[in-house]
Amino acid sequence: MRTAVVPSPPRTPVRAPDGPRARRNTGRRGRATRPAAAVLALCVGGSLLLAGCSNAGESLAQQACVHISKSIRLYTQAEHAPAAARAQAKANEAVGQLEKALPLAAQANSADPVFNPLMTTLQEIGRTSEANLIPALRAQCAAADNPTASPFSATTVRTGG
């Protein structure tokens, strides 16, 4: 048994309808505007995403500065403590706060290298007295807390003593 092949009717091109709705996807010269709009939206979205990331370093530096402020307060209490045991306990707590600040400062530096001085100063824990670090830490945290008022600048740390 043979099967007959029936030819299909010839295809006729479909003409697009005329009118304002038919030209919705094209610009003045007939170019497609949707891909351009998609690229524009992608660029704007990417810019906003990157702008949000730029604040990550600042936020991390500010978190580190919270620990630094606690440390300075504890160190000041240790200096004025009447008993040696109490002074040592407060000094140890102060160092502990600086140790908590160090990873946050390192992450801030990774997000924005402008925070490198803060991280570098905190790396001096154990090499020098906290009394030598306090002026630099205060200046660096003041800059991190208000970055538009003053640029984050490198400060020197006195070693030895």
Image: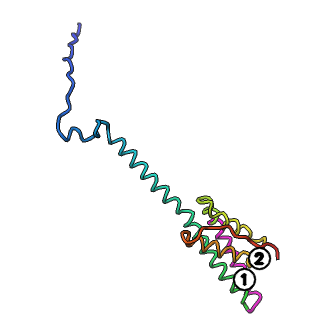
Q: Position of residue 115 (x, y in %)?
A: 63, 64
Magenta highlight: main SS: helix
Q: Around disc 1, counting alpha carbons within 10 Å, would you say few (fewer than 14), some (14 to 19), or many (20 or more)?
A: some
Q: Dot 1 corresponds to which residue?
A: 89
Q: Amino acid at mark 2?
A: Ser
Where is 11 relative to 96, above or below? above
Give the spatial CA distance, label 2 vs label 1.
15 Å
Q: Nearer the viewer, residue 152 or 80?
A: 152
Picture quarter containing residue 160?
Answer: bottom right
Q: Residue furthest bottom?
A: 82
Q: Residue at x 29, y 40 (%)?
A: 27
Q: Amino acid at mark 1?
A: Ala
Magenta span: 82-104
Quadrant assignment, res 96:
bottom right
Residue 94 on the magenta segment = yes
The furthest residue to the top:
1
**Which sits in the foreground, 30 or 109?**
30
Give the position of the N terminus as an image quadrant.
Answer: top left
Compare residues 159 and 91 and report the one nearer the observer. 159
Viewer-nearest of discs 2 and 1: 2
**Left or right: 145, with 13 as reference point:** right
Where residue 49 sits: x, y (%)?
A: 47, 55
Label drawn at residue 9: none
Give the residue drawn at x 68%, y 70%: 99
Seen from the viewer's position, the closer of residues 15 and 27 is 27
Q: Which mark is residue 129?
A: 2
